[in-house]
């Protein structure tokens, strides 16, 4: 692998994800939403000026028919995992550090490939 390939991979995946909890009751799970999708949605929010669009709750945006798509967060770890183990799971998406792998309810951190540079 050439020295440029890892850097190019990082640049290709340089947009960020925002973690969100989707669902209600016992069916809650962590999902990811691309920050550029949120920005694009807010820029096109009809009948709102920029200040008003920033006040739109994320839950409202997620529940709009045809609104923002989310992706289930597939890379989860807890804070006690060794960094060497977590590194093997890094891809284009971040690894979410959660309070409990069995039934995560709280996000404790986010680890991306950039954090390891």
Image (spheres, rainbow, N blue to C red):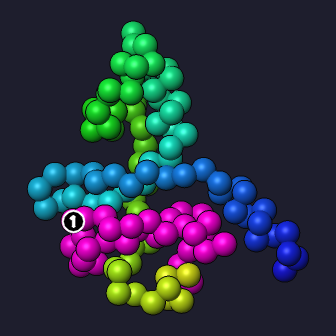
Screen quadrant of the N terminus: bottom right
Q: Left or right: 90 with respect to 30?
A: right
Q: Is residue 93 above or below residue 19?
A: below
**Residue that mark 1 sits on:** 105
Screen quadrant of the C terminus: bottom right
Q: Residue furthest left?
A: 25
Please check the rendered image and state whether residue 72 is part of the magenta-colored stretch, yes or no. Answer: no
Which corner quadrant of the image does residue 65 belong to? top left
Q: Residue 27 at x, y = what percent?
A: 18, 59
Looking at the image, can residue 46 be seen?
no
For image coordinates 88% across by 76% down, the residue present is 2
For image coordinates 56% across by 81% down, the residue present is 87
Q: Residues within 10 Å of mark 1 (few under 14, many from 20)?
A: some
Looking at the image, can residue 116 be seen?
yes
Considering depth in this image, is 22 or 18 the residue closer to the camera? Answer: 18
For image coordinates 34% across by 52% down, the residue present is 20
Q: Mark 1 falls on what kind of element?
A: loop
Q: Left or right: 71 with respect to 65?
A: right
Q: Residue 55 at x, y = what percent?
A: 32, 26
Please check the rendered image and state whether residue 97 is part of the magenta-colored stretch, yes or no. Answer: yes
Q: Residue 29 at x, y = what percent?
A: 27, 60
Span highlighted in magenta in the image:
88-117
Q: Residue furthest top?
A: 47
Q: Left or right: 6 with respect to 76?
A: right
Q: Residue 98 at x, y = what percent?
A: 31, 71
Q: Is residue 52 above or below residue 111?
A: above
Q: Is residue 59 above or below residue 17?
A: above
Q: Residue furthest right?
A: 2
Which corner quadrant of the image does residue 57 belong to? top left
């Amino acid at each position: 692998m050439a020295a440029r390939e890892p850097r190019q991979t990082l640049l290709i995946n340089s947009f960020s994800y925002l973690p969100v909890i989707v669902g209600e009751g016992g069916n809650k799970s962590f999902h990811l939403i691309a920050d550029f999708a949120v920005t694009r949605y807010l820029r096109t929010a009809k009948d709102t000026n920029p200040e008003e669009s920033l006040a739109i709750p994320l839950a409202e945006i997620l529940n709009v028919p045809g609104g923002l798509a989310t992706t289930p967060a597939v890379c989860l770890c807890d804070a006690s995992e060794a960094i060497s183990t977590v590194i093997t799971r890094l891809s284009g998406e971040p690894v979410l550090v959660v309070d409990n792998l069995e039934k995560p309810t709280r996000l404790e951190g986010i680890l991306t490939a950039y954090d390891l540079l």
